[in-house]
Image (cartoon, rainbow, N blue to C red):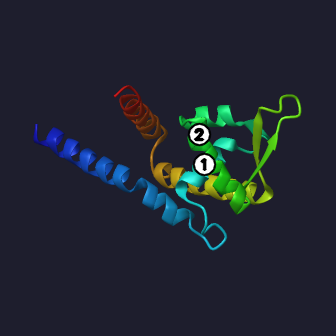
Amino acid sequence: MEKVMNINSTLNDVLVKLFRNVNAIEERAMRTEEYKDVTTNDMHVIEAIGMEGARNMTSVARSLEVTTGTLTIAINSLVKKGYVDRVRSEEDRRVVLISLSEKGRRAYLHHRRFHERMIESVVEELTEEEQRILAKALAKLYHFFRVT
């Protein structure tokens, strides 16, 4: 029983600290001279737009689980900073298409490299079985938050 309490206490401590500090940790890691004007939220919008080309606002808002109004505020800022291009669709002028500018694509790749390094540091000393267990545990944690 003592061992279970110890692991539960340790997991609780790690998860609470991680969730409390994840944005600050990520923002600190992402902060460079080139990207000093980009917040973690900006990076997540850039990531949601992706490198595949122009996307409509509704699909990006849906992938971020925010309203199009909330996304519009973020996009306005990213357009002003030069990370995102915004145009009206030729087929339907009511549709706004957004895509990453060259500066936005560089920021996207910078963010992706951070995530790759983060995952590498987590799994580098784990066996394949431990990696599968960790992935399963984190998927369960994600599910807990989705249904709570």
Give the vertical position of 112 relative to 7 (above or below).
below
In the image, residue 64 lies at what x, y percent?
A: 56, 38
Which type of secondary structure does the marked residue at label 1 adopt? helix
Left or right, residue 25 beside residue 93? left
- Residue 73 numbered tag: 1
Kind of element beneath mark 2? helix
Mark 1 crowd level (few <14, some 14–19, many ≥20, 10 Å Cα): few
Image quarter where the N terminus lies is top left
Please provide percent x and percent y for residue 20. Answer: 34, 53
Please name the amino acid that badge 1 sits on: Ile
Q: Which residue is mark 2?
A: 69
Q: Residue at x 76, y 38 (%)?
A: 96
Residue at 31% in and 54% down: 17
75 in relation to 30, above or below: above
Residue type at the position of mark 2: Gly
Lateral position of residue 58 relative to residue 29, left or right: right
Q: Is residue 144 above or below residue 74?
A: above
